[in-house]
Image (cartoon, helix red, strand yellow):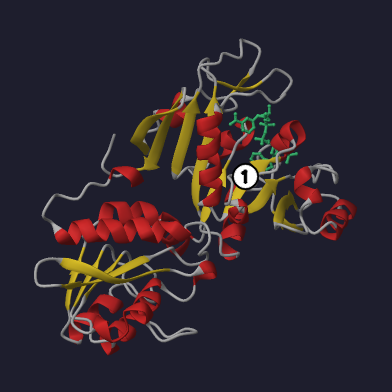
């Protein structure tokens, strides 16, 4: 176990700033996967009743990224914001866009003190929000809860810095390190608890990606089927160099109801592109890799997703796509679910041409969480 994990952030007893920021981080995560292209930020406003701080308002980035969390919380606090302390999980913005900056709104509301988890690397903000607050004479503390905020806002940070989404690779493996049956047939590996966890990962991601091999083998739906959370299904993305996914697969059949992006090579057949577009899919073409495999270049594909505002991408394999991500150093986070079932010698390896250790013992990643999901053991790794 590690203190970096979502569920395991324990603030020292008696440290109000850490305790309240922890609550703001938790609240901020509630719109993860629904706030893109913006990060899902949490704000809690407290005021002392003479004995202890009392929460008077809270806000989370609204669906689609606006209004921001601070605006929502200030609206709820009204006049009571004057002299109160605001806990914000990301530096308040400092630039005029569709709305005035949140730092100005906090100043106008005469907030007394601001506690910020982490600075926003967005060049339009990047310390300016903090400066505006301090210049207005507001006590502003930065860094409380920063380790967790770095994880929670990883999608925003990655997109701002590198133009692509934060990439979380999820793999379910058998006890003998396999991921599918011989002949690339699907295998039942995960138990019901880890299946539910997989759906939570979908709900908290902006998009979910598979390779064409997984569509051909499994005909997946890639939606969130947890009761009451169906509306949290992410955008679906398929890497399909030659546009070979069938028009009658679940993903294409539902493309008018939920966005489907198919990423193809430049030389993929135009008629198939037209048929997919008629069915409701968006087809993006990217250059091919220069190696003999001639697949759509995965780094270009990721930039295209970043350009479309996707900040958190969940990749659900299969083995060829997982190998590509590792090869191009595109795994920012990994969730590996190890089941007790064995699939046997002739089943297919979890990562094409590489041992599972290439992921689980990668020098680029560190384990931030390990726990049982029913009968399965889950390991979560995060980029160092
Ligand atoms: N247990 C699990 O977690 C899990 C998850 C998913 C799948 N599976 C299993 O995995 C098996 C399917 O394996 P798979 O390896 O064929 O599936 P895959 O990795 O989903 O698909 C691979 C295909 O994606 C296409 N692709 C396009 N661009 C690519 C790129 N840049 N890098 C990599 N791939 C790219 C390639 O086909 P083109 O060259 O034609 O474009 C490639 O052959 C099935 O048995 C399925 O049940 C298991």
Query: Can you say whether 64 is above or below 80 in the image?
Result: above
Q: Quadrant of ligand 1?
A: top right
Left/right placement of residue 259 relative to residue 229 reads: right
Query: Can you say whether 281 is above or below 363 in the image?
Result: below
Residue in front for this viewpoint, 136 or 288: 136
Residue 191, quarter of the rendered image: top right
Left/right placement of residue 336 relative to residue 319 reads: left
Residue 380, quarter of the rendered image: top left
Percent coordinates x, y for residue 335 in the rendering: 46, 36
Q: Can the viewer see residue 327? A: no
Q: Residue at x 87, y 51 (%)?
A: 272
Q: Residue at x 39, y 79 (%)?
A: 71
Residue in front for this viewpoint, 106 or 157: 106
Residue in front for this viewpoint, 63 or 259: 63
How many numbered discs sit on the rendered protein?
A: 1
Left/right placement of residue 105 relative to residue 292 reads: left
Image quadrant in which the N terminus is located: top left
Q: Residue at x 44, y 69 (%)?
A: 61
- Badge 1 marks a residue whose secondary structure is loop
Left/right placement of residue 32 relative to residue 301 reads: left
Q: Residue beneath label 1, please?
A: 225
Percent coordinates x, y for residue 245 in the rendering: 80, 42
Image quadrant in which the C terminus is located: top left
Query: Can you say whether 332 is above or below 350 in the image?
Result: below
């Amino acid at each position: 176990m590690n203190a970096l994990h979502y569920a395991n952030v324990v603030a020292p007893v008696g440290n109000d700033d850490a305790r309240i920021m922890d609550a703001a981080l938790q609240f901020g995560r509630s719109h993860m996967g629904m706030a893109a292209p913006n990060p899902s930020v949490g704000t809690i406003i407290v005021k002392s009743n003479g004995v202890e701080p009392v929460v008077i308002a809270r806000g989370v980035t609204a669906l689609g990224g606006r209004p921001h969390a601070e605006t929502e919380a200030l609206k709820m606090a009204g006049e009571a914001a004057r002299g109160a302390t605001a806990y914000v999980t990301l530096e308040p913005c400092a630039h005029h866009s569709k709305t005035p900056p949140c730092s100005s709104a906090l100043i106008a509301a005469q907030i007394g003190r601001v506690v910020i988890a982490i600075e926003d690397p967005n060049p339009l903000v990047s310390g300016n929000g903090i400066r505006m607050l301090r210049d207005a004479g507001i006590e502003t503390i930065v860094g409380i809860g920063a380790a967790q905020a770095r994880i929670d806002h990883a999608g925003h940070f990655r997109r701002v810095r590198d133009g692509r989404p934060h990439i979380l690779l999820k793999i379910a493996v058998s006890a003998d390190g396999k991921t599918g049956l011989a002949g690339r047939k699907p295998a039942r590996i995960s138990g019901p608890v880890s299946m539910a966890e997989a759906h939570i990962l979908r709900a908290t991601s902006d998009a979910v990606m598979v390779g064409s091999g997984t569509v051909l083998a499994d005909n997946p739906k890639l939606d969130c089927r947890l009761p009451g959370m169906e509306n949290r299904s992410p955008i679906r993305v398929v890497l399909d160099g030659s546009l070979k996914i069938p028009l009658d697969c679940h993903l294409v059949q539902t493309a008018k109801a939920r966005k489907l992006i198919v990423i193809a090579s430049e030389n993929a057949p135009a008629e198939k592109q037209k048929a997919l577009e008629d069915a409701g899919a968006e087809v993006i073409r990217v250059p091919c890799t220069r190696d003999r495999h001639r697949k759509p270049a995965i780094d270009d594909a990721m930039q295209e997703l970043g350009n479309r505002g996707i900040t958190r991408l969940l990749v659900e394999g299969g083995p060829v796509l997982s190998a590509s991500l590792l090869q191009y150093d595109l795994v920012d986070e990994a969730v590996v679910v190890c089941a007790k079932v064995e699939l046997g010698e002739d089943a297919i390896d979890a990562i094409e041409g590489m041992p599972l250790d290439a992921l689980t013992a990668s020098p680029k990643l560190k384990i931030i969480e390990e726990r049982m999901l029913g009968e399965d053991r889950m390991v979560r790794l995060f980029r160092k």
